[in-house]
Image (cartoon, coloured by chain):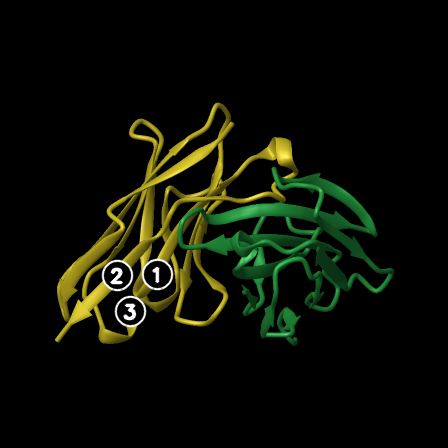
Amino acid sequence: AQSVTQLGSHVSVSEGALVLLRCNYSSSVPPYLFWYVQYPNQGLQLLLKYTSAATLVKGINGFEAEFKKSETSFHLTKPSAHMSDAAEYFCAVTLMNSGYSTLTFGKGTMLLVSP
Amino acid sequence: KAGVTQTPRYLIKTRGQQVTLSCSPISGHRSVSWYQQTPGQGLQFLFEYFSETQRNKGNFPGRFSGRQFSNSRSEMNVSTLELGDSALYLCASKDTGSSTGELFFGEGSRLTVL
């Protein structure tokens, strides 16, 4: 079975600082990986996805993530944080044996951005 | 294209009652999944429907059920509500022509059980 671990339930950065949200996965077969963002009282919005093409994936709002198979990681980064980035971020994995239909999510990381 | 629409957005029920939540997927999407989100357990998969058939099911008791209609709209039902069923219930649709597993989520139905 697959699993996702997000290190740090809360991450605090200053506006303009680097954002780094960590995600490690466990899977016996090559996974597809996703980062979603959730703003208060809203659903999940896809930031970016890795589907076995390029290992460095660029997403919306200046975010990017790098798939590292040797480290089983898919960390999310953004060079310069903006106040509007404050939200909860979820890493998720899906596998071919579920028809890529079932997502397993990490527990989420709340990003706090201070002025 | 309109996004995934969930109704109602908020509702309050008492223990022992039942509730039905509705989800309209993005036009053309035939796969609909449901997830439960709670502060303690995070996001957990409930079930997935495709072409009116349940294709996958998570580890939830039989009080949780769902169905999908011929127009791909889906409903989920929770019977004999318990306090622990208080959660945000998220519906997601998927373009089954896509091979990448990307899900599009609605804004959720927030259920409070008193």
From the image, which quarter does the N terminus of chain B lie in?
A: bottom right
- Name the secondary structure under disc 2: strand
Q: Amino acid at mark 3?
A: Asp
- For residue A88, the mark is 1
Residue underneath mark 2: A111
Mark 2 or mark 1: name the one nearer the start of the chain: 1
Please say whether residue B25 is visible from this viewpoint: yes
Q: Is residue A45 above or below residue B96?
A: below
Q: Inspect the image, locate mark 2, and give the three-letter code of the amino acid beneath it.
A: Leu
CB contact under 8 Å: marks 2 and 3: yes
Residue occupying the far right of the picture: B70
Q: Quadrant of the C terminus of chain B?
A: bottom right
To which chain does the residue with label 3 belong?
Answer: A
Q: Which chain corresponds to the colour yellow?
A: A
Occupied quadrant, residue A74: top left
**2 and 1 marks on the same chain:** yes
Q: Are marks 2 and 1 in contact (CB under 8 Å)?
A: yes
The amino acid marked with disc number 1 is Glu
Q: Chain of mark 1?
A: A
**Colour chain B appears in:** green
Give how far apart the Cα atoms at labels 1 and 3 are.
9 Å
In the rendered image, is residue B100 in sight?
no
Q: Residue at x 79, y 61 (%)?
A: B72
Where residue A26 appears, x then y in whole percent? 41, 29
Q: Which label number is shown at residue A112?
A: none
Of residues A32 and B41, the one nearer the viewer is B41
Chain hosting mark 2: A
Q: Which mark is residue A85?
A: 3
